[in-house]
Amino acid sequence: MALGFEPVGVLRRVARDVALRRYRSAEIFGRFRAWRQSVRRQPVLIYQMGKVASTTIEASLQRAEVQPFFKVHSLREPKLAAERQAYASRWQPDAGGWHIWESIRAQHLVDRRNGQWTVISLVRDPVARNLSAFFQVAEFRHGIPLAYLDRHVDAPWVVDVLVDEFLGTYAGHHEPATWFQEELEAVFGIDVYATPFDKGRGFSSYVTDRANVVVIRMEDLRDVFADAMRVVLPGREIPIVSANRGETKSYAELYRRVREEAVLPSAYLDELYRSRYARHFYTDAEIARFRGAWTARSTSSDGGR
């Protein structure tokens, strides 16, 4: 007799939900899942700093049934230890954490396995990336009351409050400028700054005995994704799948207001847009356009607020 549902699948979901209630059991569950996925096959690594559209890459690989793959932000122990501590101290079942447990497994494999790794990485306008990353961790890591601010989303002061918190509280402003040296170069020995980035193409590849890497600009992702995937996953046709989770976050309206209305200090914009990172991956015209978005706001942008 057909039951109308899959009891094994239901039991697995129940077990997962129970495990995620506490950090320790969630970590055990997550690390076991990462081990099981990679025990026989080496995973593709989506290896990049946070908030550069890696969720879109993840969804696209999943739809194309590219398995296994891990989405990781760091493969270096000091940073992983700090991330584990941060999640453990403020654990919430919906806070994420899978990337940490997959990173631990990937670090173990990279340290112990010879052979070439397939790596997909991304870059993004550093100011836009930092603002997105700030919202991702504002409540969870810094205790900023986004739920309260969301109830006052139409207030004229809310953008200024969030900009002040962003500039004064968020600790990751320099991550775009340091990530490639501290991560990709330290782990795989690939210096992306040693050769010019193909700004006209929107992505570049780097191949060594240790890794076959493609670095894609997020701003070009939709146009170049299929071509970039052919470089690191030859023989596969992988269409892009849109997966913009930011629009579904509880803070989506707050984030939209800040993106559209925030004016950021010139000194901050100088620091990020004159960095080696920005100049390597973007043209002067592109940087000027990015910068203009944070300085030239219409006086009518309050929309009647």
Image: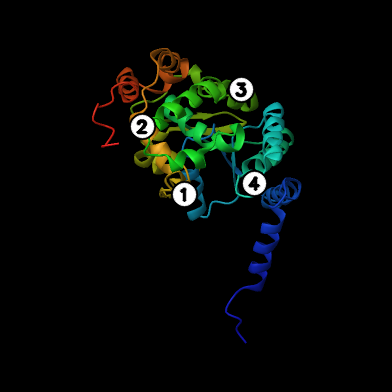
Task: Tell me the CA gap for discs 2 and 1.
Answer: 39 Å
Residue 180 seen anywhere in this rendered image of the structure: no
Report the amino acid beneath label 3: Glu
Counting residues from the start of the chain, the first of labels 2 and 1 encountered is 1
Residues at marks 2 and 3, CA–CA distance in whole angstroms: 40 Å
Q: Earlier in the sequence, mark 2 or mark 4?
A: 4
Q: Quadrant of the N terminus?
A: bottom right
Label 2 element class? loop
Provide residue 112's location: percent of width, then percent of height.
74, 35
Looking at the image, tell me whether mark 3 or mark 4 is earlier in sequence order: 4
Residue 282 can be seen in this image: yes
Image x and y of residue 2, in percent? 60, 84
- Label 3 vs label 1: CA separation? 27 Å
Q: Position of residue 256 (x, y in %)?
A: 38, 38
| Residue under pointer 4 | 92
Label 4, residues with CA under 10 Å away: few <14, some 14-19, many ≥20: some
| Labels 3 and 1: the sequence-earlier one | 1
Q: Secondary structure at mark 3?
A: helix
- Looking at marks 4 and 1 on the same chain, the residue that comes earlier in the sequence is marked by 1
**Rendering quarter of residue 45:** top right
* SS category of the residue bearing label 1: helix
Disc number for residue 182: 3
Q: Outermost residue toward the bottom?
A: 1
Q: Which mark is residue 60?
A: 1
Q: Which three-letter amino acid code belongs to the residue tagged 1?
A: Ser
The residue under label 2 is 156
Residue 90 is situated, as x and y percent measured from the top left of the image, at 67, 39
Q: CA distance from mark 4 to mark 1?
A: 27 Å
